[in-house]
């Protein structure tokens, strides 16, 4: 990339795009992101086998304007909570290389003009930073939130407005033409190609940058009005000091988005409320502190249930491996909560579901009784199994919890948890409150 930067001032953008240096960087980005093949069924590994020849061919097609992006493969991903599906598109590898190269080329041009309140799909910025920024705004007293939800944003981006917006920074019209061709490449679903007259392909390398270009116009309008906000992709929260002001902002900004940006507000999901009633990137700001939202907690509880089903042929060790794979990623993100008991609740639910499995493995109450005694539970305490308690109730009894203590799941099964260290840190910070 350093070599590329040396001649960016000497060549025009399209010539830079067609260089094998940039195309190779584009392929590296595609390979790093992984993903399945497009409609031609060519995998990343197969494309890489003849990478030099493939990139030379791609360069030749770009220069001669014989390059034609293929339609993207339509993929439907279920939304959380069964709220319909999210439509994604999977471009072919060669088209992803072109888009990734375009992103590398254009991102440095747009980054300096993007708002400091925009956090989505930008280098050096993250969801955690967005939530932290929202917390800091709420702590200044602006606890009322205008929570804006854009309906099918990626599917409704106006191509003409997008190209016009791009042209204010990108002077090389050949780049704009190429982006236009890419936007109109179509979608293949059920063997038929559907033209794309609006929208950007959610799931393609270039789409995140284009979405920020579109919504930068919203950012600039909010800044012009002197409003404080946090935006991550199409998830935008505006913070004000009173409900009356919030309702006025909602009305005015809705008009701007629908009339000027030609996008649609989802009135069912958009609302005005205090921050503690608003979910932002899975989190909620409660009296200036960060907590996992109720919706996210409920989804996590359901996920634990899904990962620990009854009647499975999977061993408990295999189940723990599956849980660890999910929970490590989940907890690494939601570990930003300032309420450690929330992590404890999820981990306690995991342990109880596993204890319930252990109870269920014993084919009779007598077997269970003997198992508990063998694991050091007194005979008197173990007799609880002879009551009328079902497996779920038994999993929360003193007998079963003593036989399979919390530490056993870590040392014996390799269950990876996050809350203990966070709890210790929390108690250190708040012990003066506890002691008084």
Image (tube, rainbow, N blue to C red):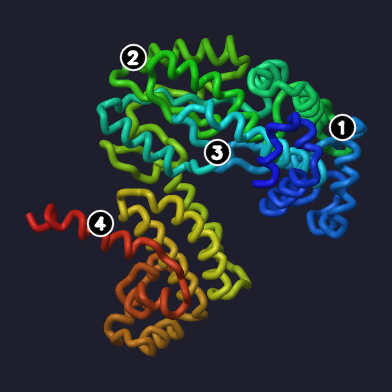
**Secondary element type, mark 1:** strand
The residue identified by callout 4 is 426
Residue at the image position 78 percent from the left and 40 percent from the top? 98
Tell me whether circle 4 and circle 3 mark residues in contact (CB < 8 Å): no
From the viewer's perspective, is the residue at label 3 or at label 1 nearer?
A: 3
Q: Residues within 10 Å of mark 4 (few under 14, many from 20)?
A: some
Q: Residues within 10 Å of mark 1 (few under 14, many from 20)?
A: some
Percent position (x, y) of residue 391?
Answer: 44, 69
**Secondary element type, mark 4:** helix
The residue identified by callout 3 is 122
From the viewer's perspective, is the residue at label 2 or at label 3 nearer?
A: 3
The residue identified by callout 1 is 193
Q: Considering depth in this image, is 237 or 292 the residue closer to the camera? A: 237
Mark nearer the N terminus (4 vs 2): 2
Determine the CA span between mark 4 and mark 1: 55 Å
Determine the CA span between mark 2 and mark 3: 30 Å
Q: Is residue 243 left or right of residue 118?
A: left
Tell me whether circle 4 and circle 2 mark residues in contact (CB < 8 Å): no
- Relative to residue 57, is residue 233 depicted above or below? above
Q: Residues within 10 Å of mark 3 (few under 14, many from 20)?
A: some
Determine the CA span between mark 3 and mark 1: 32 Å
From the viewer's perspective, is the residue at label 4 or at label 3 nearer?
A: 3
Q: Residues within 10 Å of mark 2 (few under 14, many from 20)?
A: some
Percent position (x, y) of residue 331?
Answer: 44, 56
Q: Which quadrant of the rendered structure holds the C terminus?
A: bottom left
Q: Is residue 158 visible?
A: no
Q: Is residue 360 visible?
A: yes
Tell me whether circle 2 and circle 3 mark residues in contact (CB < 8 Å): no
Mark nearer the N terminus (4 vs 3): 3
């Amino acid at each position: 990339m350093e070599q590329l930067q040396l001649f960016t001032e000497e060549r025009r953008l399209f010539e830079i795009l067609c260089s094998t240096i940039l195309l190779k960087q584009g392929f590296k980005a595609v390979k790093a992101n992984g993903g399945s093949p497009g409609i031609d069924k060519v995998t990343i590994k197969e494309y890489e086998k003849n990478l030099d020849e493939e990139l030379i061919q791609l360069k030749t097609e770009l220069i001669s304007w014989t390059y034609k992006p293929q339609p993207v493969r339509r993929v439907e991903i279920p939304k959380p909570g069964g709220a319909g599906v999210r439509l994604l598109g999977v471009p072919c590898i060669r088209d992803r290389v072109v888009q990734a190269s375009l992103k590398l080329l254009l991102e440095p041009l747009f980054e300096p003009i993007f708002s400091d309140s925009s956090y989505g799909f930008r280098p050096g910025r993250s969801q955690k930073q967005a939530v932290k920024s929202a917390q800091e705004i709420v702590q200044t007293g602006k606890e009322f939130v205008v929570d804006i939800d854009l309906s099918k944003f990626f599917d409704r981006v106006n191509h003409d407005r997008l190209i016009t917006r791009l042209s204010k920074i990108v002077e090389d019209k050949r780049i704009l033409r190429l982006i236009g061709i890419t936007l109109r490449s179509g979608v293949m679903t059920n063997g038929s190609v559907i033209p794309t007259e609006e929208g950007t392909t959610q799931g393609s390398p270039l789409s995140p940058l284009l979405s920020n270009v579109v919504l930068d116009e919203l950012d600039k309008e909010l800044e012009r009005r002197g409003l404080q906000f946090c935006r991550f992709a199409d998830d935008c929260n505006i913070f004000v000091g009173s409900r009356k002001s919030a309702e006025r902002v909602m009305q005015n900004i809705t008009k701007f988005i629908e009339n000027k940006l030609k996008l649609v507000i989802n009135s069912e999901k958009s609302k005005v409320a205090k921050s503690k009633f608003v979910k932002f990137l899975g989190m909620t700001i409660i009296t200036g502190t960060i907590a996992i939202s109720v919706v996210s907690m409920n989804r996590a509880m359901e996920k634990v249930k899904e990962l620990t089903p009854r009647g499975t042929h999977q061993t408990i060790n295999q189940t723990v491996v599956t849980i660890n794979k999910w929970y490590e990623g989940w907890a690494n993100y939601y570990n930003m909560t300032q309420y450690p008991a929330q992590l404890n609740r999820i981990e306690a639910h995991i342990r109880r579901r596993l204890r319930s499995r252990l109870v269920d493995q014993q084919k009779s109450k007598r077997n269970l009784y003997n198992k508990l005694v063998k694991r050091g539970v007194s005979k008197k305490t173990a007799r609880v199994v002879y009551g009328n308690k079902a497996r779920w109730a038994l999993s929360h009894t003193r007998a079963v919890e003593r036989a399979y203590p919390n530490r056993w799941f870590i040392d014996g099964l390799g269950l990876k948890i996050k809350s203990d260290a966070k709890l210790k840190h929390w108690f250190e910070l708040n012990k003066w409150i506890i002691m008084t």
